[in-house]
Amino acid sequence: MAQVVSEVSDSLATLTGRQDVPSAQQSAASNFADGLSRVSSDTQLESQKCSLKNDDISVIDSPQQPMSLMRTLILFAGLAFCVFLCSLDQTIVATAIPRIASDFNSLTDVAWIGSAYLLATAAVTPLYGRLTAIFGLKQVFLFALAMFLVGSLGCALSNSMVMLIVFRAVSGIGGESMYALALVIITTVSTPKWSATLQGWFGAVFAVSAAVGPLLGGVFTDKLTWRWAFYINLPFGAVSMGIIIFGFYMPPITGSIKEKLRRIDYFGAVLLLIAVITLLLGVSWGGNTYPWDSAVVISLFCVAAVACAAFIWVEGWHAKQPFIPGRVLNSRNVALTMITSFLSGWVIFSLVYYVPLFYQLVRNKSATDAGLMLIPLMVLCCICTAASTMVIGRYGRWTYRSILTFGFLLTILSLGLCLTFWEEEKRVTETVILALLGAGLGSVWQSVYMTAQASCQPRDMPVSTMLCSFFQVMGATIGLAVTGSVFNNASEKYSPELPVSASAAGPALSGSMENIHQLPEDIRALVIHGLIQAFHILFISLIPPTAVAALTSVFIRPRRWSEVQNDAGPGGAAH
């Protein structure tokens, strides 16, 4: 279910040093002091212009001081709307896909609704970091939001499947990147204590919207029209855009548009796009459209490998302003955090997809009822997301890896307990297990972003944040492909156990709920038993990546959260 991910959210680039820009309100009382202030300002501006020409860009894009608490909360509300929409968009659209396919009479192309969004998201997310360093954080965020809204409007007005797919790609250019950019903004404008707290609430908002999406999607599809799954983005997005425009001030970066465009590493961008797109196409098509050993899939993986190697070579030795600075690539903490992020995306999104599927296939729940079954998981996920970030903001240092390791170990325990799910529904027991699973996932979800931010120099914080989002999306995409293959192979493995009279159950084991629950009772029992065993193997397959993630988190070097922002000055992360 590529569209569930999709929803990744994620960016390789450089934002750097913060420099103080005196405000008009701080002008000296005397003419002599005014003169000194102007001289100081001119000197500083020239220094900033010069620094923009260097490989190690120093961006003058940070406010002089943290915003007041009230202004920060207003800005948070605007950003939270965007976080809510980019998470809601994927799950609400997934629910509407069957009706969309029916209206356009184009079932064969329906997979591209999610794939187009995913390809666009993964392709452009690594570019946003450098673009924020060149054009400014506020400007890039508004661009991403505008692309998301234009894509949503185009999808709502689509009169063909082709038009819908094209505008889903447009939405993907801005959608998932807004989450990582929102984290960077809130870190920039707030104090260390409030930054950690608000980042935790961002994670909670993301989890809530992911749970609400299927419910709203079902209501819109059944009671109104699937087009409202896209229309709903417009009013909330407009409110958010207004808050960002009028409530978020950043001193502009000097230089003309032409000068800024010259700073973009176009060759590196093209190589990165080729590597990401061919890799994801290979993963999406392998085992579905084409066999894994087909010439098409193998060729795509070969092109991705060559493009990736060329990108590393260009960025490491030839690019004057690389998307990923060498100091970031050489950081042990950054490398470990990206591995952890990749594996967390693999595990989290696989569970978000397959746990509801278990209740639909095995328990014969509707999509809405299956979503309601996830409420315990989502509630604990929200609580632990907020709590873990608050603990990191308060105590820092050792809590990064402790919380990550705890979260992954709790997830492993919960996966083991999921093996107790059989034909008989034990509501209380399953609710407790899902709550534990939510606590484990919630402890990891936002903590990995804060770990990424703490793993680099303050000027590179946006780069590491976008990298974290990018690797999480890639992990989710590849993880879903792997778990899908595991589940399908396990289903085939247990299908021979059925008697000859149950040969009609073959399609049922492939995931057709109608076939499963229309079979005679004795045959249906055998089919469901085989499906349960397939789900058990799937849960077991998620334990190794979770264990590796727990192991890598142990080796992350500690750093106090307050040190991360204090190094950049009172305004937080530098840009």
Image: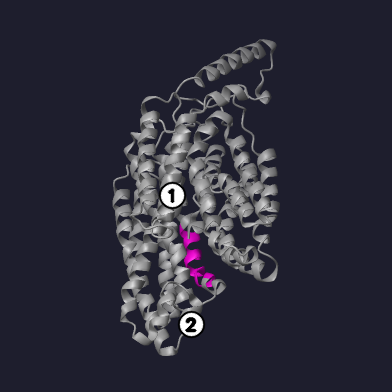
| Image position, residue 270 (x, y; %) | 47, 35
The disc placed on residue 280 is 1
Residue at 36% x, 50% y is 295
Marks 2 and 1 sit apart, C-alpha to C-alpha, by: 34 Å
Asked if residue 460 is positioned above or below residue 452 in the image, the reply reads above
Name the residue nearer the viewer: 171 or 285: 285
The residue carrying pointer 2 sits among few (fewer than 14), some (14 to 19) or many (20 or more) residues within 10 Å by Cα, namely some
Asked if residue 377 is positioned above or below residue 455 in the image, the reply reads below
Name the residue nearer the viewer: 115 or 463: 115
Asked if residue 344 is positioned above or below residue 334 in the image, the reply reads below
Name the residue nearer the viewer: 258 or 250: 258
The kind of secondary structure element at disc 2 is helix
Residue type at mark 2: give it.
His
Prevailing secondary structure of the magenta residues: helix
Residue at 59% x, 53% y is 165
| Residue 222 seen in this snapshot | yes
Residue at 36% x, 25% y is 317
| Image position, residue 208 (x, y; %) | 55, 60
Residue at 50% x, 37% y is 127
User: Is residue 64 in the magenta section?
Assistant: no
| Image position, residue 403 (x, y; %) | 37, 53
Task: List the single residue furthest toward the front.
Answer: 295
Q: Which residue is mark 2?
A: 517
Name the residue nearer the viewer: 520 or 412: 520
Q: Which residues are magenta?
A: 371-384
Horizontal arrangement in the rendering, residue 561 relative to residue 261 (left or right): left
